[in-house]
Amino acid sequence: MTGFTLDRLGWRPWLTPLSEDELTDAHREALVDRARAASPYFRLLARDPEILHARTKTDQDIFHHPDGGLPRAERELAATATSRHNGCVFCASVHARFAAHHSRRPDDVRRLLDEGVTAPQDARWRAIVDAAVAVAGTPAALGPGHIAALRAAGLDDLAISDAIHAAAFFSWANRLMLSLGEPAPEAGA
């Protein structure tokens, strides 16, 4: 499976995840959200519950904290652009759906998936996508020009920090996911 999509996808691990029956209370606590027990990805990461717990709390803080900063839609945009750049079809599909939903701009998100990270976007989204892609490629590629473009697009320091955190986290998350398995049709589809 290689096409970028807004559709829900499954994920097939190359290593054996824990079964739901094997999950202990410590594993379930590490999942943070018990619904994640249905995911083979999270059950695989649950083999190291302490790291999974830290990873999940970091993810939640980057994408779900409500105190100022970048709106959720644009945090998801940064994750989508990073995932598109890195070739992580699964993560791009998940975060593209969130970006489309929260922004109410599904056509712009679809264009990012279909045409790539250089697809036309308005100035604000262009600045966020360009900064995310710079971080995804190599953090040193993010420079003063990116920060100036983000500021010109109306982002304050906290919003810029949120965009960079979303891109940096997904640069890591994509590499982990791409190293452990591959996207697959959603179960039952």
Image: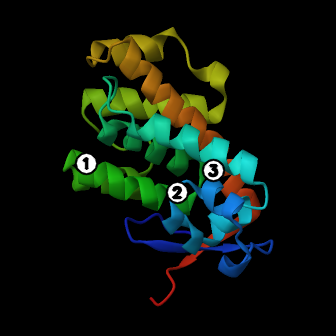
- Secondary structure beneath dot 1 equals helix
The quadrant the N terminus occupies is bottom right
First of labels 3, 1 by sequence position:
1
Residue identifier under label 1: 102
**Residue at the spot 31% in from the left edge and 18% down from the top edge:** 155
Label drawn at residue 174: 3
**On screen, 175 above or below 7?**
above
Q: Residues within 10 Å of mark 2 (few under 14, many from 20)?
A: many
Of 126 and 159, nearer the camera is 159
The amino acid sitting under disc 1 is His
Of 164 and 28, nearer the camera is 28
Question: Residue 115's spot in the image, x, y percent?
Answer: 40, 53
First of labels 2, 3 by sequence position:
2
- Secondary structure beneath dot 3 equals helix
Label drawn at residue 91: 2
Image marks 2 and 3: residues in contact by CB distance under 8 Å: yes
- Secondary structure beneath dot 2 equals helix
The amino acid sitting under disc 3 is Asn
**Residue at the spot 30% in from the left edge and 42% down from the top edge:** 73
What is the spatial separation of the Cα atoms under label 2 and label 1, in whole angstroms? 16 Å
Question: Residue 179's spot in the image, x, y percent?
Answer: 75, 58
